[in-house]
Amino acid sequence: MKDYPNYTTVNFQKELEKELEKLTGEGRVPSLLLHSCCAPCSSYCLTYLSDYFWITVDYYNPNIYPPEEYRLRAEEQKRLIERLPARHPITYMEGAYRPEVFFEMAKGLEEVKEGGERCFRCYELRLREAAERAAEGGFDYFTTTLSISPLKNAAKLNEIGARLSQEYQVSYLYSDFKKKNGYRRSLELSEEYGLYRQNYCGCVYSRR
């Protein structure tokens, strides 16, 4: 897997396109564990990537508060997968909902501004779980839907993903799903499928 000295200068959409072109040329359909934060963000990612991969959606989000919000988002994710047409089947798996894991991670960072170090650690918390599950399940790749949001730091997400890829020996699929109108398309798909769109990222701090 290619590493980069400076992740802030890389066009990760182009890197993704190169990887997809290579897979198409090889004529194979690898398996992908896709961490998803919510149905709306996953909508475009799934329609895009299901042409190239056998996808398992990994819904692991202990950051979401309150529990009722977590359950609503999880059920909406399952509902989307059931309705979404895809070239290759999409399956669903759900991690344990243990908010205490998130709060332990965020200790001392409660007042940090949204988009800062607390968020970066939350990225890693969820991506690490995805990398571990991908390694245990024998997946070819893992990645996350998080980069589709204009509020998420794609460079940091890809940097963390690359590091975990080396640690767990599973390829990380570089991406910046907001590019090429990905975010706008996710809004259109959310409306088309009548998806619940939350008005905050998920954790109690973003809700405030």
Image (spheres, grey):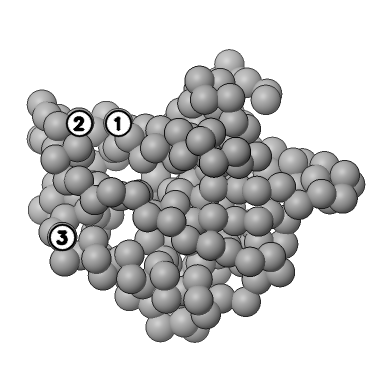
**How far apart, in angstroms, are the residues tagged by discs 1 and 3?**
21 Å
Q: In front here: 187 or 164? A: 164
The amino acid pointed to by label 2 is: Met
- Residue 123, visible in the rendered structure: no
Q: Position of residue 100 (x, y in %)?
A: 14, 40
Q: Residue at x 58, y 25 (%)?
A: 169
- Check contact, mark 2 vs mark 1: CB within 8 A: yes
- Check contact, mark 3 vs mark 2: CB within 8 A: no
Nearer-N-terminus badge (2/1): 2
1 vs 3, front mark: 3
Q: Residue at x 33, y 71 (%)?
A: 75
Give the number of the disc on residue 121: 1
Q: Would you say 157 lies left or right of 3 here? A: left
The quarter holding residue 174 reads top right
Q: Residues within 10 Å of mark 1 (few under 14, many from 20)?
A: some
Nearer-N-terminus badge (1/3): 3
Give the number of the disc on residue 105: 2
SS at mark 1 in the image? helix
SS at mark 3 in the image? helix
Residue identifier under label 3: 67
Q: Position of residue 79 (x, y in %)?
A: 42, 76
Q: Would you say 180 lies left or right of 202 here? A: right
**How far apart, in angstroms, are the residues tagged by discs 3 and 2?**
18 Å
Q: Is residue 100 above or below residue 79?
A: above
Q: Residues within 10 Å of mark 3 (few under 14, many from 20)?
A: some
Q: Position of residue 69 (x, y in %)?
A: 20, 65
